[in-house]
Image (cartoon, grey):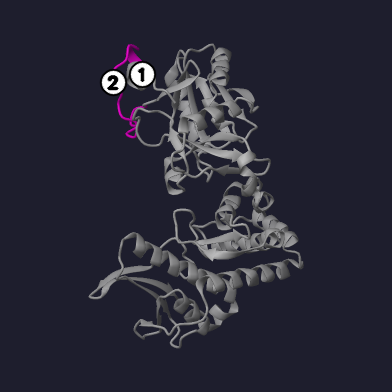
Amino acid sequence: MYSSLQKIDIAAKSPEGPVYVQTDHRTREEVEAEPELSTLFALARLLIAKAHATKQNEADASVVYASISEEPIPLLAEVVAAAGAKLSSGSEKARALAPVAATPNGLLDKAFRALATRCAQRTGSTDPAIALAAIEAETLADVPDLEDDEIVYWTRVLELSALTGEVVRAKHGGTWETLPDLQLSDVPFAFKLGGGELLLPTNRAGRFMEDGPEESMFHMIDSAGESRDRENLPVLPSLRTRAEAEAQQIVFRELLKKDYGEGLPVIAYGTDSPTQFGLMKQQPDQDLEALHAKALANLATQEVAVQEIDAGNTVLLVVTNSFFATEKLLDRAFMRSLQKRLKSEMLAVTVPRRGLMFVVDGAAGDPRRSMAVLATLTAKESGTSRKISSAILIVQDGEVVGRVQLEGDASAPEAPPTKRPGFFRRLFGGGKSSA
C-alpha cells in the first residue's frame, strides 16, 4: 500500500547487502492526480526505510521504490533521486538515478505548501486558519480509522499538518524539514520555525483524531514560538511512560526507586504556559533533586476537582479538571487529604491518562472488589494517546510506596513478605520507597 507510513513492504538480502522495498501500485494517472500527497507519501516511506537501515548499522543497505508503472513517473523519480534511493518501474530491475537539483527538504516544503492550498480551495477559503477550522470540523464529524482505511487516515494527518504549517509560517516564518530521528514522530517530517523551534504537526494531528478538540491543531499554533521565553516559566512535574521519556530524551526520574516491574510511569519535568506544557530535555550536570523540589513546590499551587462516586459499593474518588490532575499523585499534602477523606491509611491509585486520577480505599473491608473496580475503569480510560499507566499504585502517608500485584500480573515482580497478614501480604508490594 503506497500510504503505509509505519512499515517497510519488503525486506530482503542480496549479495550486495540488505534491500528494503517500498511498493506503489498506482497508475501514472493516479499518482499525478495527487502530486502533493504522492510526494509526501513517497518521501516519508523512503526516509522510514533509510532510517531503519541506519538504526541497524547497515551501511550497505539499498532502499528501493517499486512502481507498477512500466515507464518511470517523473514525479516519483525526482523524489527517489533526491532521497538517494533506487527506482524500479514495472518489470525493470532497481536502478540508481542521476542526481537531481531537488533536495528532500525542498520537495517536502513545496509539497506541504501546495497541499495546504489545495485543502483551502476545497473549503472555499483562501485563509489557512479558516480552512483548518473547517477541516477539523470535517474530521470530527467522521473520524478516519487507521485500521479501516489508512489512506484516508494518513491523508487527513498530512492535510491538517499542511494547514497548520502555513498558519504558523505566517506568524513566525519557518519551513518543513525531514526528521532523521524517527523516535520523535511516526512521520519523518517537522516544521522548523524561523527561531529554530521544532514542531511536530503530524503527531498533533494523530492525537487530534484520537482525542478530539482538546488536542486541536490550534493549541499548537497558539503555543508556537513560546520556547524562547521558557526560562521564565514555572517548572512542573509530568507523569509519562518510560518509553516516551527515553525516546524523546527528556529529563526524568523514577517514580519508585525499587524495581516493581514494567508499566510504572516516570516523573518528567517541563515548563508551563497558558497554551503549552514544554517537556525539558536532558542536560549535562542537571541538578535533578533541585529540579524535582522546584516542580513539587509549583505543583502544590495547582487546583483540581475531586468527585466522589459510588461504584458498586466502592467509594471512588475521581481527580480531574486540571492538566496536572495526575501529577497531584506527587503532592503529599493533597494525597494525605484524600486519605483523610476516605478515612484510610492506604490508598490504591491509578493514573490512566493525563488529566485523570482514580483513588479508592486500599485497605477497605473487601479490597479485592475495590481493586477490580479500579482496574476496570483504568483499562477503559487508558486507551488513548494520552495514556500514562494502568498500574495500581499504593499510597501511604501521602507518598507512593509500591504497586498492587494482582493475580496474573506478570509485570509486577513479587515483593519480599511484609508484616501485613493474609491477603495484603500477597497483594501489595514491599516496603516504602521514596519518590
Q: Is residue 18 left or right of residue 200?
A: left
Can you give x and y, in whole percent of width and height, for residue 142 in the image? 63, 56
What secondary structure characterizes most of the magenta part? loop
User: Where is residue 21, by image quadrant?
Assistant: bottom left
Distance in Å between CA atoms under marks 1 and 2 = 8 Å
Can you give x and y, in whole percent of width and height, for residue 151 in the image? 53, 65
The answer to whether residue 298 is magenta is no
Q: Which mark is residue 36?
A: none
Q: Which residue is found at the position 34% from the left and 64% from the top?
A: 53
Provide the residue designation for mark 1. Answer: 431
Q: Which residue is found at the position 66% from the left and 47% from the top?
A: 213
Disc 1 residue type (three-letter) = Gly
Can you give x and y, in whole percent of width and height, for residue 90 in the image? 40, 84
Q: Are marks 1 and 2 in contact (CB under 8 Å)?
A: yes
Q: Which mark is residue 416?
A: 2
Can you give x and y, in whole percent of width and height, for residue 125 in the image? 77, 66
Q: Which residues are magenta?
A: 406-424
In this view of the protein, can residue 8 be seen by the observer?
A: no
Q: Which residue is found at the position 35% from the left and 12% from the top?
A: 420
Disc 2 residue type (three-letter) = Pro
Q: Is residue 225 left or right of residue 394?
A: right
Q: Is residue 413 left or right of residue 264?
A: left
Relative to 265, residue 153 above or below: below
Q: What crowding class fits label 2: few (fewer than 14 Cα within 10 Å), some (14-19), or many (20 or more)?
A: few
